Image: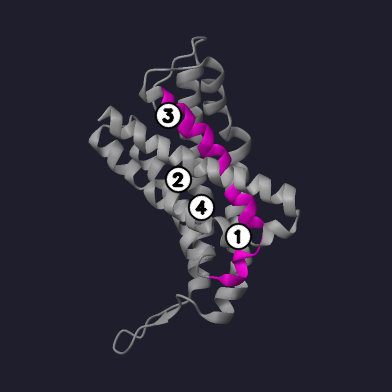
């Protein structure tokens, strides 16, 4: 089982490292022109990595990973919704700067997280890496939530114009679902969920960095 979880972390690390490095190299090579086609160049790999992260819910349920189920579920769900429902379904949104920002933040955080988890799976801990792992979210996670909310905001006019996911159920139900309203409701849920996740991450940081030694439990 240790070999499996190590392999999973390694694959995720490689995927997010590729994304992170690609974003930087493309920006240094092509400047702002690289930003608008981030999704077309990197979206497939990001989609695979995010879909694979669903396995982590099974890891927690089966006791392979030590973490709380609900916070991880919320973190995975918010990314899946933004990536597949908001970005992938609207071609006009895919070229927005916010997509590049989101991909950069997600890959940066996950390169650190999976590096830590991969080493922890082998019983190796470094004090500096442990501190970074449990501290990096402080500036980056709230920023990523704001970026997700902005992506939703940017997508609203396109959902209103195209009517994507808006449905009208036939008689006798006579119920209509206007998807922009669903997205606006989701934005409120996103911030509420983010508050819960921040509390969880703060408790985890306090738990693992409360003493001066470098060891930490896997997360």
Taking the spot 42% from the left edge, 17% from the top edge, the residue there is 124
**Residue designated by label 1:** 151
**Residue designated by label 3:** 117
User: From the viewer's perspective, is residue 216 above or below residue 146?
Assistant: above
**Residue designated by label 2:** 75
Q: Earlier in the sequence, mark 4 or mark 2?
A: 2
Q: Give me the disc on residue 73.
A: none
Taking the spot 47% from the left edge, 37% from the top edge, the residue there is 13
Q: Is residue 114 magenta?
A: yes
> Are discs 4 and 3 less than 8 Å apart at CB?
no
Q: Where is residue 173? Give x, y as percent.
A: 31, 84
Image check: 62 left or right of 119? left
Query: 43 or 170, which is in the foreground?
Result: 43
- Are there few (<14), some (14-19), or many (20+) residues within 10 Å of tag 3? many
The extreme bottom residue here reads 171
Image check: 70 left or right of 45? left
């Amino acid at each position: 089982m240790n070999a499996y979880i190590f392999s999973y972390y390694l694959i995720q690390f490689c995927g997010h490292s590729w994304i992170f490095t690609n974003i930087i190299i493309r920006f240094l090579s092509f400047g702002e022109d690289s930003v608008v086609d981030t999704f077309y160049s990197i979206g497939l790999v990001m989609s695979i990595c995010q879909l694979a992260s669903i396995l982590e819910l099974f890891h927690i349920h089966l006791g392979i990973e030590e973490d709380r189920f609900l916070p991880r579920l919320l973190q995975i769900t918010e990314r899946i919704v933004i990536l597949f429902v908001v970005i992938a379904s609207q071609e006009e949104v895919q070229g927005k700067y916010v997509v590049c920002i989101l991909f950069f933040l997600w890959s940066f955080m996950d390169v650190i997280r999976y590096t830590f988890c991969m080493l922890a799976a082998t019983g190796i801990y470094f004090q500096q890496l442990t501190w970074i792992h449990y501290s990096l979210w402080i500036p980056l996670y709230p920023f990523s939530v704001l970026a997700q909310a902005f992506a939703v905001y940017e997508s609203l006019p396109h959902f209103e114009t195209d009517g994507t996911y808006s449905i009208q159920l036939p008689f006798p139900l006579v119920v209509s679902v206007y998807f922009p309203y669903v997205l606006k409701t989701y934005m409120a849920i996103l911030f509420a969920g983010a508050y819960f996740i921040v509390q969880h991450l703060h408790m985890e940081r306090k738990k693992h960095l409360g003493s001066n030694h470098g060891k930490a439990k896997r997360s």
